[in-house]
Image: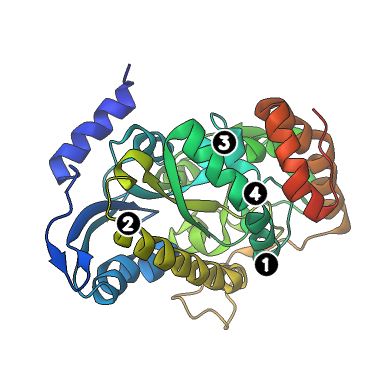
Amino acid sequence: MLTRPVLAALAVAAVIGLAPAPATAQTQGLPATTFNVVGSIGNLSMYLNREVPFWNETVPKESAGAIKVQLKSFTELGLKGPEIFRLVSAGTLQFATTVLNYNSGEVPMNEAADLVGLVGSVEELRKAVEVLRPSYAKFLEEKHGLKLLGFGTYQAQVIYCRDAFTNVADLKGRKVRASGASQQTFVSHIGGSPITIAFAEVQPALASGVIDCAITGALSGYRSKWHESAKFISPMPINFGLAAHLANLAWWKTLDPKVQAFLETHVRKLEDSIFEQARTETQTGIDCNTGSAACKEGQPAAMKLVAVTPADEALRKDALVKAIMPGFAQRCGADCVANWNATIGKSLDLKMGQ
């Protein structure tokens, strides 16, 4: 049975013309193919700097005009984000880029490479993704009817707060916007109250005091003007906002094998460019939020930087071992844990119990 959010999304899809578009005649060796892509958050760099030029310029050019895409971000469509994974799985959407931790409560495996405290840099995240990729792709195909074409990521997810704090332990008792199961577990572990709010609704929630703090990318929050209400920021990486480029598997199988090969090759190049962009964006975001002259993104804000302390690092590690990993193991199940231990766990010399 379709839920109300899914029915609403179907209505949106009908209005904007997200109906399947079949492949037609041959053009330049590839069959002429038109389809629809739902992109990530519309005002952020992953979408604006990478997805838009990729789908609107690179793909038509490299396919000699054979492949044409209608692209809109999920925020343009009025969707909140968590429904994207389900809509692609159901075949309502053909292709989308979605932040995986949006659905980690329903699909714990989505957060396997991006658990809070697991890695400390984009480079480390990339290594975790590589060892997980084959088994995760198989899982998506068998359990959710999805074809994994590639990954993407935002920069380090950091903490923004309205009121002063000197270390992460000070968030005890505060209402903190957290996306994904392990962020919520982390906030609970340090004594805060995790709140689920769609990204586009965070700034007004901070302004009105509905929430005290929120976690998002260092540059993402700056571009969305969180600094207008949040005056203090910690640069400690909580996690990284891993995303995936997903196609509905049944639709994917209708594509000509040449088109499939083209998309597999080029979406992996898109993945490479997104990870390269994310590598420098954490520092850019911190610079712009805290008024550094190094900010090249626009008018620097005037947030106060709350330096990461040894106690903060110890708290994050404590949360990973005592709360994040046990919570993930309980949600994910024995087979998932065994796969995690054999892939990411082995690469990081960590072992998760069930």
Crowding around mark 1 (Cα neighbors within 10 Å: few <14, some 14 to 19, many 20+) is: some
Residue indicated by mark 1 = 123
Depth check: give the residue in front, 106 or 302: 106
Residue indicated by mark 4 = 114
Residue 257's disc number: 2
Per the image, label 3 sits on a secondary structure element best described as loop
The CA distance from mark 4 to mark 1 is 12 Å
Depth check: give the residue in front, 77 or 302: 77
Residue indicated by mark 3 = 104
Crowding around mark 4 (Cα neighbors within 10 Å: few <14, some 14 to 19, many 20+) is: many
The numbered mark, 1 or 3, whose residue comes first in the sequence reads: 3
Residue 101, image quadrant: top right
Residue 216, above or below 324: below
Residue drawn at 16 percent across, 38 percent down: 14
The numbered mark, 3 or 4, whose residue comes first in the sequence reads: 3
Crowding around mark 2 (Cα neighbors within 10 Å: few <14, some 14 to 19, many 20+) is: few
Tell me if residue 191 can be seen.
no
